[in-house]
Amino acid sequence: MRKEQEGPTYEVLRARTVVWLAVLMVTIGIGVATWLVLAYGRDDPRNSLEAIKTAGTIVIGSGGAVALWLAVRRQRTAELAVAQKERELRQKDDEQAHIAREAVERRVTELYTMAAAQLGSDHAHVRIAGIYALERLAQNNTDQRQVIVNVLCAYLRMPHTAEDTDATEPDPERELRRAQDRQVRLAAQRLLATHLRRGPSADAFWPDITLDLAGASLVDFDLGRCHLHSATFDGAQFHGTTEFSLASFSGPVSFTDARFTGDAGFINTTWPESAAFSRARFDHEADFAQATFGSTATFDGAQVTGKADFSGTRFGYVSFDNARFAQAAMFDGARFTGRTHFGADVHSAPHFDGCTYFRAARFDQDVVFGGVRFADIVVFDDAVFHDFVGFHDSVFTSNAIFSETKLLAEARFRRTRFEAAALFGGSEFGRHANFDSALFGGEVNFHQVTFTGDVTCTGAYARLDVETLRIWPPGWLLATPPTPNTTVLPNMPGHWGRLYDR
């Protein structure tokens, strides 16, 4: 192994070898001359002289060839010596670089250990000093950045200092420690945000960072305009205002079981891969306006106590099964490019307790609102459904407005209950419009509606004892008293008449 590293070796040409070569050449010359004289110059002295000259020429030529060979060998030996010297220099440089790297690594390890130890101090100022020591270390050592980010995330995942929720009387010392711990956490959060934003100084930005803040307790967390790879916030507690607006993630992000105690902003945030908000709780407003979900977005079981704004948001595949919106839910101008799930049936359907708006929204693939209960007004004005849309078993307890809506494929309103107004004026139905077993309890308006395909109302009923304007689709008839088709439906107030499709 040692010889392979040092390169090939060559034997030095000895002086005795050179002498023997000279003797050999002289011997060959004498032998050739003697042979030529004996062969051609025995009877003629001139031939003898020419023979000697020829032999001398042969000897001189052979000597020149030997000299040329010696010169070539000398040049080759010199080149090999230079190459050997270069190898030795490179090896020496490698050894020095290795020694330097080991020294740097030892120094980094020492600094890292000291800074990490400071994070465990009981004194807030020592912990803050440790945070900034880690920052300097990461700034000067790019290969250590993710490791140091992991340390800061681990610190943020630790429980708050002096968190004593059982205390019934104020404790000044405990409150002081809590305030100090808050400042340390804010320092760690600001450090992360500073290096995840692209600014005037390219060196300050740390690319391709992953955050693991599962279960962390975060205060006024602000990653607005930040760029990172992926992040996990499962079960995290976001206290105060939370800001992710204009942030972008190149990898998956998860907020499963997270809780936002204040307003949460995700305006213009970009998720090219999956984003999970399953069972997330928003105690105040959740603003996702103009956000982009490039792949899969899941809001199954999410709860929004304040207003939920998804205006202009772009979705791929998205699911809102078992979600709950306590106040207004805004989807105006939203674009749904993948399959959309707002519940498959009454057991998985979300609840919309406030006003719901899908004005000018666009659905490129299947969308299902199976069993959804809308407790307040619902507006789909100018919305476009390019593929199947299902409102089967849904309940509209207030006005359902589908004015100028385009339902270009099959539209299924089977067993749908319209307890207030059902307004479809100016809408367009492209294929089969299915209102079988639907209930119309208030105003109905199908004025200037276009039906390109079939429209059916088998088993549908309309309430009779209300004074409202009703404009039915062409061919629909409503049975009125005293026909035997007037009936009382279970769990439904008033008298109802059956609808017929001629």
Image (spheres, rainbow, N blue to C red):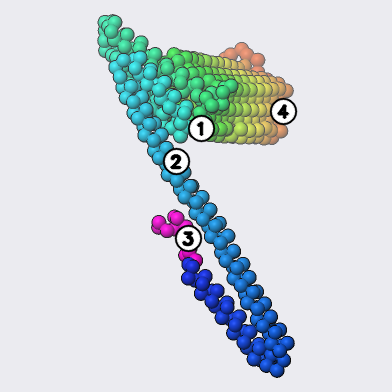
Q: Secondary structure at mark 1?
A: loop
Q: Quadrant of residue 396?
A: top right
| Mark 4 crowdedness (10 Å alpha carbons): few <14, some 14-19, many ≥20 | some
The residue carrying mark 1 is: 208
The residue carrying mark 3 is: 8
The residue carrying mark 4 is: 450
Q: Residue at x 48, y 70 (%)?
A: 16
Q: Secondary structure at mark 3?
A: loop
Give the alpha-carbon distance from disc 1 to disc 2, as whole Å.
Answer: 28 Å
Foreground residue among 316 and 16: 16
Q: Residue at x 35, y 30 (%)?
A: 110
Foreground residue among 57 and 149: 57
Q: Residue at x 66, y 88 (%)?
A: 37
Image position of 309 (left or right of 303)? right
Magenta residues? 1-13
Q: Quadrant of the C terminus?
A: top right
The mark that comes first in sequence, 1 or 4, is 1
**Nearer the viewer's eye, disc 3 or disc 4?**
3
Query: Residue 454 location, x and y as percent?
Result: 67, 34
| Mark 3 crowdedness (10 Å alpha carbons): few <14, some 14-19, many ≥20 | few
Indicate the amino acid at tag 4: Thr
**Nearer the viewer's eye, disc 1 or disc 4?**
1
Q: Tag on residue 97?
A: 2
